[in-house]
Every structure is written in C-alpha cells, then in structure tokens.
Image (spheres, rainbow, N blue to C red):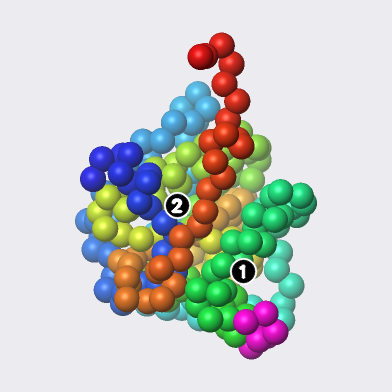
Amino acid sequence: MDVIEAIQSRKSVRAFKTDPVPREVLQAIMEAALRAPSWANTQPWEFAIVGGEVMKKLSAALVDKASSGAMPNPDIPMPSFEGAYRERMQSTGMRLFQEVGIVRDDSEARLNWMLSMTRFFDAPNAVIVYMEASLGEWSLIDIGLTLENLMLAAWHYGVGTCPEAAAVLYPEVLRSLLEIPESKRIILGLAVGYPDFSSPVMKFRTERESMEALVVWHGLD
C-alpha cells in the first residue's frame, strides 16, 4: 500500500476483532511513527503500548471511573467549537448514531456508546501518547505529526486505529496503571487492533469539505 492509498482509505475504526496485534507488527508501526518530523528534531513524544492483561485492567478501570460519575479532568482541556466547526461535529455525530441505530432520546444507548469509547471499542491493544508537561504548543503539533505516521503505518499493516480523547479523560487512572510520572502531560489515546468489517459501524465514514471551501491559491493559474 503506497502512502496516497493509505491516506485515502484510512478511517477511524470503532469495531475490532479480538486477535491481539503481534508485538513485531506493533514495533514496525512504531518505527514508522518515530520517523515523524519535529521542531529542531526535539522528538517530544513518548508512548505507552498496551495489550494483554494490562489492556483489560486499563479498560475496566476507565469504565469504572466513567460509570462512577467522576468529573473528567484531562491534561488537555476539551475544546469548545462554534459556527461551521460545531456544525461539522454535530453532523458527524448524528450520522454516526444513525449508522449504529442510536436514536436521539435513547439516553441508555448514548451512555453505552460513551462507555464503549472509554474501553477503546474493545480493541485488544492501545497506544497512549504523552510528553513532558513543560513543553508547549509546538510540541503538540509535533505529536500530531507522529500520530498521523502511526495511523497510516498501522493501516499499511492491516491494523485499524481510532484516536480517542475519551481514553485520556481520567489521567490519574493511566498514570497509576501505566506508571506515567506526574511530570508528563497525557495527550491522547488510540484504540488499536484488526478491524471487524462485519460490524455495522464499519460502514460509517466521515465526510470532508471540498478543496474549494478550504484552499486558497496564490500566484498559480
């Protein structure tokens, strides 16, 4: 699979087979991820790769925390969107719920969906990315670059991913189970595993705005 094919075909995966991803495949994916560019080659990213019994404990602990009604306290504050950005977000959420059969007033189904995100959509593996808390916004950009490398490399190997803010809503759980120091800022989690293409949710694909709406050309015919 070449890079353009990977970019065009990759999607967020929300249904996984139970088969764990072999360590050698995860290592190949991470080797590609670590080739991402960064400001002056600072390479601010750090990763925890999770599987096996630790994955089960992590998923269970996050679900327990979310089910308890505890207020989320992520290291990166949740964003608030307005205008076109909010419209895109709402449209995507409505289309996704329609695909999986969740109606607007079904609060129990919505809660179960939220908990499924918290447990990484039952993926057999996960990646948690973090960095030194003293680093700033440019390092966050660098981490975005390495995560794109990671997701495209995973797709090349037939492995699906889903970047998830829900995975890092309770950083104290992650720090406890994964021994991540308080000096680190936990950025994002990714569900990782082989896609279950038989699941209805795998039919869902997000839309993109047209090039005409987002790109301005200067000095070019």
Q: Residue at x 44, y 31 (%)?
A: 37
Q: Position of residue 23 (x, y in %)?
A: 25, 60
Q: Position of residue 172 (x, y in %)?
A: 62, 67
Q: Position of residue 206 (x, y in %)?
A: 50, 57
Q: Which residue is mark 2?
A: 47
Circle 1: element type:
helix
Q: Residue at x 55, y 75 (%)?
A: 98
Badge 2 density bin: few <14, some 14–19, many ≥20, Cα 10 Å = some
Q: Closer to the N terminus: mark 2 or mark 1?
A: 2
In front of the other: label 2 or label 1?
Answer: 1
Q: Is residue 162 above or below residue 71?
A: above
Q: Residue at x 41, y 35 (%)?
A: 36
Pointer 2 and pointer 1: residues touching (CB < 8 Å)? no
Q: Residue furthest top?
A: 219
Q: Position of residue 79 (x, y in %)?
A: 72, 54
Circle 2: element type:
strand
Q: Which residue is mark 1?
A: 94
Q: Quadrant of residue 50?
A: bottom left
The type of residue carrying mark 2 is: Phe
Give the extent of the magenta segment: 103-108
Q: For marks 2 and 1, give the CA distance.
A: 32 Å
The type of residue carrying mark 1 is: Met
- Label disc, if present, on residue 57 of the rendered structure: none
Left-right relation of 130 to 158 = right
